[in-house]
Image (tube, rainbow, N blue to C red):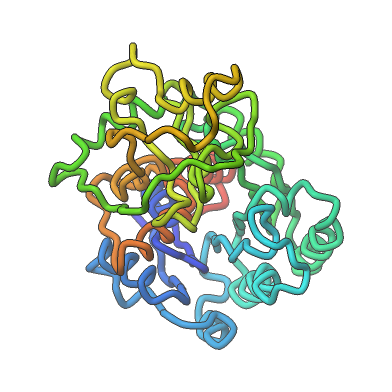
């Protein structure tokens, strides 16, 4: 039985790839600029290392001509820093042009479908309306009907507050069926406690302590109604609500922007999170900020925990220094969400894909 085929661009550590592979796609070509991420991609696919082409996609574009008209899907998540509210939102950021490089690849390969992932802001902010319209116009000129939608990945089983925009291009037809299938695939996400307890005991070989960044209280905290919002500590790392969803995992994890875990609250659902107590004391005027000591059982999220929150397989291997591994995880598309995207595509257009 022939497998559905795909080209993966801006592959990173392979979050999208894991999902599409699980849905039955065979990746025939992958590209990633970052060396450590490319090594991670290959380490988890030892039989397909020749598929990964490391380097600048603008230089490697001519290699894609060999796949013209033979590939089912071209997918990828071009760098989002230029569009992200977590960045400078600089319209002149050269990386922002890579979404159009993605379309150059579409033009060369002429897949039946394309799927592009990016940050929520690209799909919602008026600031990027001209960019969206240009992108859709260019894709339309290439012969694709294009639609886009912002998805809350937690509605698809991902234990994280992570919103992403998905652009879908269909060569013969419209993307309407895809978005209808996505609605059918919604399911509840587990809580932070459920996910973190599944990883293994903190400090064990299965879940080693991988972030030594100190946790220090801010003298001028940014207060919000919730202790899990605002900024109670120095840096951008926020405490995790054990009975809720972890915050969006940033690519800047590894230092003081790594989320924070109260180990006692994790182990015992009857124990109030230390930051919740601290927040109440400040609000009530019973505590001057940064004048008490954070207990030692409050610690940073580990690499294994971060990868699990991003729904990577438990045996997935990451390469490079620890901060590089954190970055790969934070940059990734949750593989469970990627699987739902690929599955919706298969269900909606099974007659057009390479299926028997």
Residue at 43 percent of width and 21 percent of height: 243
Along the line of sight, which residue is nearer the eye, 19 or 163? Answer: 163
The residue most toward the top is: 270
- Residue 96 lies, with reference to residue 87, above or below; the image says below
Horizontal and vertical percent for residue 329? 41, 54
Horizontal and vertical percent for residue 252? 49, 58
The quadrant where residue 207 appears: top left
- Residue 19 lies, with reference to residue 143, above or below; the image says above
In the image: residue 312, left or right of residue 79: left
- Residue 10 lies, with reference to residue 33, above or below; the image says above
The quadrant where residue 159 appears: top left
Residue at 46 percent of width and 65 percent of height: 11
Residue 149 visible, this angle: yes
**Where, quadrant-wise, is the N terminus in this rendering?**
bottom left
Horizontal and vertical percent for residue 233? 50, 42
Residue 190 visible, this angle: no
In the image: residue 149, left or right of residue 184: right
In the image: residue 152, left or right of residue 46: right
Residue at 38 percent of width and 60 percent of height: 26
In the image: residue 289, left or right of residue 26: right
How many labels, in total? 0
Horizontal and vertical percent for residue 287? 52, 25
């Amino acid at each position: 039985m022939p497998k559905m085929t795909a080209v993966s661009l801006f592959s990173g550590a392979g979050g999208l790839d894991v999902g599409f592979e699980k849905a039955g796609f065979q990746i025939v070509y992958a590209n990633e600029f970052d060396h450590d991420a490319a090594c991670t991609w290959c380490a988890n696919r030892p039989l397909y290392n020749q598929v990964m082409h490391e380097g600048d996609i603008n230089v490697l574009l001519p290699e894609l001509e060999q796949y013209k008209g033979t590939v089912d899907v071209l997918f990828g998540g071009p760098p989002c820093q230029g569009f992200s509210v977590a960045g400078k939102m600089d319209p002149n950021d050269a990386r922002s042009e890579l979404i159009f490089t993605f379309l150059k690849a579409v033009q060369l390969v002429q897949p039946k479908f394309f799927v592009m992932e990016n940050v929520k802001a690209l799909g919602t902010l008026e600031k990027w309306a001209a960019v969206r319209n240009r992108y859709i116009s260019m894709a339309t000129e290439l012969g694709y009907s294009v639609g886009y939608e912002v998805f809350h990945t937690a509605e698809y089983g991902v234990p994280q507050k992570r919103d992403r925009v998905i652009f879908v291009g269909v060569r013969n037809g419209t993307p309407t069926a895809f978005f209808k299938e996505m609605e059918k695939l919604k399911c509840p996400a587990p809580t932070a406690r459920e996910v973190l307890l599944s990883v293994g005991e903190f400090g064990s070989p299965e879940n080693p302590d991988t972030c030594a960044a100190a946790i220090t209280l801010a003298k001028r905290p940014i207060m919000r109604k919730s202790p899990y919002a605002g900024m109670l500590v120095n840096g951008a790392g926020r405490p995790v609500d054990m009975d809720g969803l972890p915050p969006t995992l940033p690519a800047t994890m590894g230092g003081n922007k790594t989320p924070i875990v109260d180990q006692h609250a994790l182990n015992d659902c009857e124990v109030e999170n230390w930051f919740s107590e601290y927040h109440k004391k400040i609000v009530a005027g019973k505590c001057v900020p940064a004048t008490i000591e954070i207990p030692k059982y409050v610690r940073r999220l580990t690499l294994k925990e971060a990868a699990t929150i991003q729904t990577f397989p438990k045996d997935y291997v990451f390469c490079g220094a620890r901060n590089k591994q954190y970055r790969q995880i934070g940059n990734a598309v949750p593989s469970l969400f990627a699987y739902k995207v690929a599955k919706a595509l298969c269900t909606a257009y099974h007659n057009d894909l390479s299926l028997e």
